[in-house]
Image (spheres, rainbow, N blue to C red):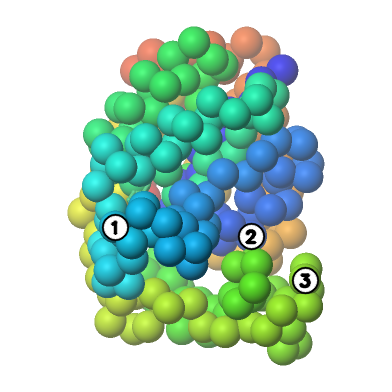
């Protein structure tokens, strides 16, 4: 069965960390638009040059530009069994584009990881990522547990940038909770717990939301979670 997952949640909610676990659980590719853009910046491609300054400031890059990137990525054959989108959509127009892109595929399953702003700021202030492969550091140590590369703070985790990213999230991305919230495949997850507990919760919720043919039901009013209390 095709499993088409979308991860929602503020920066620092653990989307990347969870996605890396879940891609192994379900054997589907983890598609992180942030990672794709950081690769493009690092490689100095035309796309990278176009988006570098916007990313540095914590703003969002143009809907059409990022949608083109995602459309091309979702056309790759490795997404045949599904995909795990991390960082897209981030605006209502992006969500509408995604609905069009996947119109002929299994319905999207939405994983919304919920975290307070205070906790987001606390987490991002101490986040380290691998300078080589971009993996988030988990636990102690000075090198990446995946590739042995050096750990550094992420360029856009500086306090002023974090505050801007949170503002952008509140204004542009949080409305997606209402956009998706009434679908039966919307899963609301408490992100303020240990990563393994969050993973177990996600697996349980996604399996429950896709069982018994409920995955086809996206009518308003068929929701199984309350998005308004976010
Ligand atoms: P992330 O790693 O998901 O936090 O993304 C890092 C940065 O990449 C964001 O702050 C944006 O500047 C840019 N970005 C990633 N995904 C998108 C998107 N779907 N729409 C617009 N900008 C994006």
Examine the rendered structure and indicate whether residue 179 appears above or below residue 63: above
> Which numbered mark, 3 or 1, is in the foreground of this view?
1
Q: Which residue is mark 3?
A: 147
Looking at the rendering, the quadrant in which ligand 1 lies is bottom left
Query: Closer to the N terminus: mark 2 or mark 3?
Result: 2
Residues at circles 2 and 1 in contact by the CB criterion of under 8 Å: no
> Which numbered mark, 2 or 1, is in the foreground of this view?
1
Q: Could you say where residue 149 lies in the image, as x and y percent from the top left?
A: 71, 79
Distance Cα–Cα, label 2 vs label 3: 16 Å
Question: What residue is shown at x 43% (from left), y 63% (from top)?
Answer: 44
Q: Is residue 66 left or right of residue 28?
A: left
Which of the 4 image quarters holds residue 157? bottom left
Residues at circles 3 and 1 in contact by the CB criterion of under 8 Å: no
Distance Cα–Cα, label 2 vs label 1: 27 Å
Task: Check disc 2: other Cα within 10 Å, few if <14, some if 14-19, many if 20+.
Answer: some
Q: Which residue is mark 2?
A: 17
Distance Cα–Cα, label 3 vs label 1: 29 Å
Question: What residue is shown at x 60% (from left), y 77% (from top)?
Answer: 131
Does residue 176 appear anywhere in the picture?
Answer: no
Query: Closer to the N terminus: mark 2 or mark 1?
Result: 2
Question: What residue is shown at x 65% (from left), y 73% (from top)?
Answer: 132
Task: Check disc 1: other Cα within 10 Å, few if <14, some if 14-19, many if 20+.
Answer: some
Q: Which residue is mark 1?
A: 50
Q: Could you say where residue 14 lies in the image, as x and y percent from the top left?
A: 56, 61
């Amino acid at each position: 069965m095709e499993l088409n997952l979308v991860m929602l949640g503020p920066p620092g909610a653990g989307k990347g960390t969870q996605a890396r676990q879940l891609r192994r659980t379900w054997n589907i590719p983890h598609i992180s638009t942030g990672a794709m853009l950081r690769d493009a910046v690092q490689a100095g491609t035309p796309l990278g040059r176009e988006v570098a300054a916007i990313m540095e400031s914590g703003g969002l890059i143009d809907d059409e530009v990022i949608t083109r990137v995602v459309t091309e990525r979702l056309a790759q054959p490795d997404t045949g069994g599904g995909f795990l989108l991390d960082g897209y959509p981030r605006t209502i127009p992006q969500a509408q584009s995604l609905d069009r892109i996947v119109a002929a595929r299994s319905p999207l399953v939405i994983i919304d990881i919920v975290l307070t702003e205070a906790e987001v700021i606390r987490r991002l202030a101490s986040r380290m990522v691998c300078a080589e492969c971009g993996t988030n550091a988990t636990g102690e140590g000075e090198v990446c547990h995946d590739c042995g590369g050096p750990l550094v703070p992420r360029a856009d985790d500086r306090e002023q940038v974090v505050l801007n990213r949170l503002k952008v999230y509140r204004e542009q991305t949080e409305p997606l909770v209402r956009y998706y919230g009434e679908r039966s495949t919307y899963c609301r997850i408490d992100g303020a717990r240990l990563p393994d507990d969050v993973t177990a919760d996600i697996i349980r919720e996604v399996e429950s939301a896709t069982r018994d043919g409920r995955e086809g039901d996206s009518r308003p009013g068929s929701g199984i979670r309350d998005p308004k209390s976010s």
